[in-house]
Image (cartoon, helix red, strand yellow):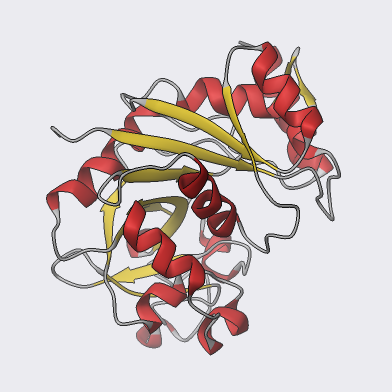
Amino acid sequence: MNETYTVIIPARFSSERLPGKPLRDIAGKTLIQRTFESAGRCRADNIVVATDDEGIAQTVRRFGGQTCMTSTSHQSGTDRVAEAARILELDPAEIIVNVQGDEPDMPGELVDQVAGLLSADPAASVATACCALDNPQQYVDPSVVKVVSDAQGHAIYFSRAAIPHAREAGGHTLDRVPWQNVRRHIGIYAYRCEYLQVLAQAPACKLETTEGLEQLRVLWMGDKIAVAEACRSPGPGIDTVVDLERAIRDFSGQ
């Protein structure tokens, strides 16, 4: 990939299940520092944390990271990233990779891969990644988002439901479902700055609100999302106290 790109990490203080999540300690470092350092192994020209909280901003600055203060009213990480891109006055053609702020084990090579995928696919407005399921239970787990792609590697649909439906396997009988062929979506996105602004300003669509999946807005608008098999899958994200406790154990063993 010859193009330069910027990583923006949205990090809000408020969280229903884990308040103050970015500042939670994971084996001696905050979650936001773990995420920043992990994603920072990529080849991006710049990495910025977009936040609505001065405490988070101060923490990031203390470990040498760049921050951008954004509104407290954003409903999604995409909206926050879009505002940060405007404040930073990024070029309309600049590729931006949105790395979620609760991903302490985001491989730098995956960040590079998603940016390169968008750069290489002029038909795509957004790029993302997928991987195999870890176990058959994930096939029917609504917290695990599945993606189905076409022959050109563009997403057909994302869903919390069990897709594609295994009709010949008798529905959702897990011991008969070919779950190894199902792909789990990884929540990392690359877009060009100009398209990001269009996406952030577009109203939520019915599919998006029904599934609770913001990326469906792109498909609803008639645009394409390039999906690649991840060169390396990230570790689990942090959404709950249980996730946090697991991450503490994992990082303590390093």
Residue 241 percent location from the top left of the image: 83, 41
Residue 112 percent location from the top left of the image: 30, 34
Instruction: Locate residue 27 relative to residue 45 in the image: left or right.
Output: right
Quadrant in the picture for the C terminus: top right
Give the mark count: 0
Residue 94 image-quadrant placement: top left
Instruction: Locate residue 122 relative to residue 188 in the image: left or right.
Output: left
Looking at the image, is 106 positioned above or below residue 61?
below
Residue at the spot x=33%, y=58% of the render? 194
Residue 1 image-quadrant placement: top left
Looking at the image, is 55 positioned above or below residue 94?
above
Looking at the image, is 216 positioned above or below residue 20?
below
Residue at the spot x=81%, y=28% of the render? 55
Instruction: Locate residue 199 relative to residue 33 in the image: left or right.
Output: left
Residue 34 percent location from the top left of the image: 62, 23
Foreground pick, 124 / 131: 124
Residue 199 percent location from the top left of the image: 43, 68
